[in-house]
Amino acid sequence: MAAAGDPAALYETHCAQCHRGGVPKAPHEVTFQMLGSDAILATMNSGVMQEQAAVLTAEQRQLLANHLGG
């Protein structure tokens, strides 16, 4: 299980399987820095990733967005 405050571990547990090519329509992880942390957070909070991100706390979503969006 991912450590609650470790964004890299959270990504590995909750995101990597799809965003490393496992789901063709999911943006690949290399595009996240182009999107930016605000867009990533918005996608998790109220966009297409809302259902998947529901298992994460608000703090975990923010940590992930900052980690991925640079």
Image (cartoon, rainbow, N blue to C red):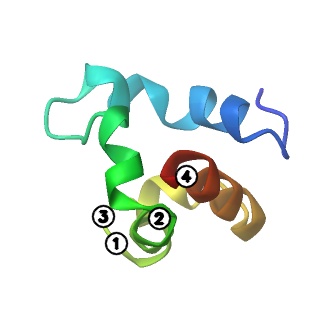
Residue at position x 50%, y 73% from top?
45
**Residues under labels 4 and 3: Cα distance?**
21 Å
Rendering coords of residue 3 (x, y %): 84, 35
What secondary structure is marked by label 2? helix
**Pointer 2: what residue?**
44
Label whose residue precedes the other's in the sequence (4 or 2): 2
Residue at position x 47%, y 27% from top?
16
- Say if mark 2 contacts mark 1, CB within 8 Å: yes
What secondary structure is marked by label 4? loop
The vertical placement of 35 against 14, above or below, is below
- Say if mark 4 contacts mark 1, CB within 8 Å: no
**Residues under labels 3 and 1: Cα distance?**
4 Å
Label whose residue precedes the other's in the sequence (4 or 3): 3
Residue 70 got which mark?
4
Q: Say left or right for 66 vs 30.
A: right
Find residue 59 and report its image quarter.
bottom right
Dot 2 surroundings within 10 Å: few (below 14), some, or many (20 or more)?
A: many
What secondary structure is marked by label 3? loop
The vertical placement of 39 against 27, above or below, is below
**Residues under labels 2 and 1: Cα distance?**
6 Å
**Pointer 1: what residue?**
47
Q: Say left or right for 26 vs 19.
A: left
**Pointer 3: what residue?**
48
Dot 3 surroundings within 10 Å: few (below 14), some, or many (20 or more)?
A: few
Q: What amino acid is labelled 1 in the image?
A: Gly
Q: What amino acid is labelled 3 in the image?
A: Val
Residue at position x 71%, y 29% from top?
9
